[in-house]
Amino acid sequence: MRLGVSTYSFWHFKGPKEKLESYIKKAYEHGFEGVEILVDHFESTKRSYLAEVKKLAFSLGLDIYAVAIHNDFVSPDPREREKQVRYTERWLEIAHYLGAKAIRVNSGRWRTIASFDELMEARGLEPPLPGYNYEDAFKWVIECIEQVLPLAEDCGVVLALENHWGLTRDADGVLRILKEVNSPWLRALMDVGNFIENTYEQLEMIAPYTIMVHAKTYYGGGEWYTLDIDYDRIFNMLRRHEFKGWVSLEYEGREDYDSGVKKSFELLSRYIKA
């Protein structure tokens, strides 16, 4: 296993953002082997800008192993779904250019609950749009992923489907999408903090399909909630399933970013090296 950090660990959608260059340098300074870039931190998608990002990471000996995007395939409007397919394909091409091996993708959600804070208060559960149901949503998501897969394979970039609310709020939803699509270019991205109920049982269910792991930490208390994660149990599970990929820190605590990330690196390094 290798230990990396998501640039999300230095910015939680609140307050001013620093330049991506700063986050990449922080990843190096904290001792990580690689960096996962949150789409919000790209200041441009021009080839000249991306080349500078790629060169900076290489100069620091960092691997850009993944890009995390915000696609949403849950929409009754076929034009909106087509827009989301094109968006995902665009980021597949960018990830390929940067040398990333995966992009984080979501299923999407109904957005019948307005804000993410309110969604967290509802523990990720939201009602469908009037006139539609979850069967409709699974059909849309699976069709969209199937449209994206040929480019993913051509680019050599895996679609890493995260257990990230919406249809993937629980392991059953993740597995339904994985099994119905049935492609080696669609795998699971295990977020250890996103199964609020029956956490370890659900993580065990997706472990055989996992290509990458998001490791959550909550120093100073979580931004939205705090889980007491048993990393002994998590890493024993990963090793039992012969997982050898990237463990990507998503620090989600209220403590100062740099001190929280430092503590997280020290915690996770003990397990990576064990």
Image: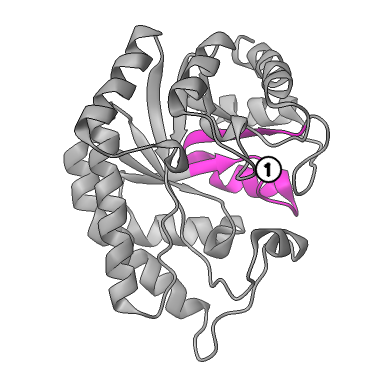
Q: How many marks?
A: 1
Up/down of 106 relative to 211, above or below:
below
From this view, report whether residue 156 is shown above or below residue 13: above
Q: Is residue 206 magenta?
A: yes
Q: Quadrant of residue 222?
A: top right
- Which residue is at the far front? 16
- Snapshot quadrant of residue 257: top right
Residue 88 seen anywhere in this rendered image of the structure = yes
Segment colored magenta = 189-218
For the C terminus, which image quadrant? top right
Residue 96 falls left or right of residue 39: left
Extreme-bottom residue of the structure: 131
Q: Is residue 69 left or right of residue 200?
A: left
Magenta residue check for 246: no
Task: Name which residue lies at 81% across and 36% down.
Answer: 228
Residue at 46% over, 54% down: 106
Residue 71 rendering spot, x and y as whole percentages: 41, 56
Camera-nearest residue between 200 and 105: 105
Q: Is residue 104 left or right of residue 15?
A: left
Q: What residue do we see at 56% from left, 35% from top?
A: 8
The image shows residue 159 at horizontal and vertical percentages of 36, 45
On screen, 192 above or below 107? above
Amino acid type of the residue tagged 1 in the rendering: Gly
Q: Secondary structure at mark 1?
A: loop
- Can the viewer see residue 245? no
Which residue in the protein does label 1 denote? 193
Residue 67: horizontal and vertical position, in percent?
40, 37
Residue under the image location 33 percent in, 72 percent down: 80
Q: Within 10 Å of the Cα at label 1, are there few (<14), some (14-19), or many (20+) other Cα atoms?
A: many
